[in-house]
Amino acid sequence: MENTFLGTDKIGEIVSKFPGASYLFKDNHIDFCCGGDRTLTAALMELKLEEDEFLAKLNVTYAASKIIQTLKVNWLEAASTDLIEYVVSTHHGYLQKELPVLSELINKIVRVHGPNHGEMLLKLNQLFQLMKKELEQHLIAEEQLAFPLIKEYDLIPSAILLNKINETLAELETEHSTVGDLLKEMRAVTNDYELPEDACRTYTLTFHKLEEMEADLFQHIHLENNILFPRYA
């Protein structure tokens, strides 16, 4: 999920698009009624609030609300083709965009904060790079093999095709478990993404993005493991 909101956006427009932002604005004493025509950057500067940190929190909150909205869709009754299209456009698209961004961010904080947090950050980077490689290969396997097989089976069912689907999905579920284990290790090594006192804007943004990615992956894997794949067991 990309950064939907920017500092150049007007406060009133943000709340119109995402009403839940009003709670964050209230908590930080940002007037989104009479002062709704100001840019977010201007409001944050006036209150001496860190823009990058605030934007990260706003966008993570918005992303979480979108996930909650998807839970209201009854995917149990949706056609497999619709579910596949949603997974590819929403979750695969997110990973394809965010994985390289996060890789660059993590490498940056390793360079800058290595003297104080080198052991933890190097381990985090190692785990992330393993997961990045796993996910990149995983997305290809789903989009080029598993999903086309499922679509073909839905049109022309056959025992041979179903057996091939089962073998493919078993491998994908194993890969899901690997990703889940790596997410747990990343959370453990960062002490639940606890920010150190000397965390800079990039450090803060990186940890927010890692938590956002974790939430997205949980929903992504849930839709596949618990809804899509069992249809072909």
Image (cartoon, rainbow, N blue to C red):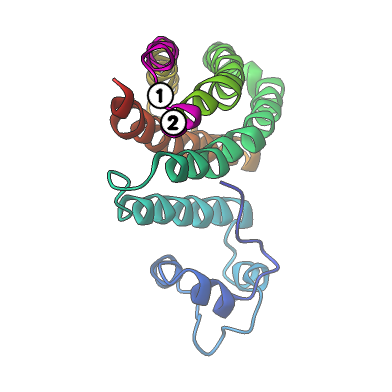
Going 69% across and 29% down the picture, which residue do you hit?
100
The picture places residue 16, in percent across and down from the top left corner, at 51, 77
Distance of mark 1 from mark 2, alpha carbons?
6 Å
The picture places residue 221, in percent across and down from the top left corner, at 39, 29
Tell whether position 75 is magenta.
no
Left or right of 32 on screen, residue 137: right
Which sits in the foreground, 230 or 211?
A: 230
Decide: few, some or many residues near mark 1? Use Cα within 10 Å; few <14, some 14-19, many ≥20.
some
The picture places residue 110, in percent across and down from the top left corner, at 66, 21
- Point out which mark residue 193 bears: 2
- Point out which mark residue 126 bears: none
Q: For the residue marked with disc 2, what is the amino acid?
A: Tyr
- Point out which mark residue 187 bears: 1
**Among the 4 quarters of the image, the one containing residue 43:** bottom right
Left or right of 174 on screen, residue 233: left
**Quick one: SS at disc 1?**
helix
**Quick one: SS at disc 2?**
loop
First in sequence, mark 1 or 2: give its number. 1
The picture places residue 42, in percent across and down from the top left corner, at 67, 73
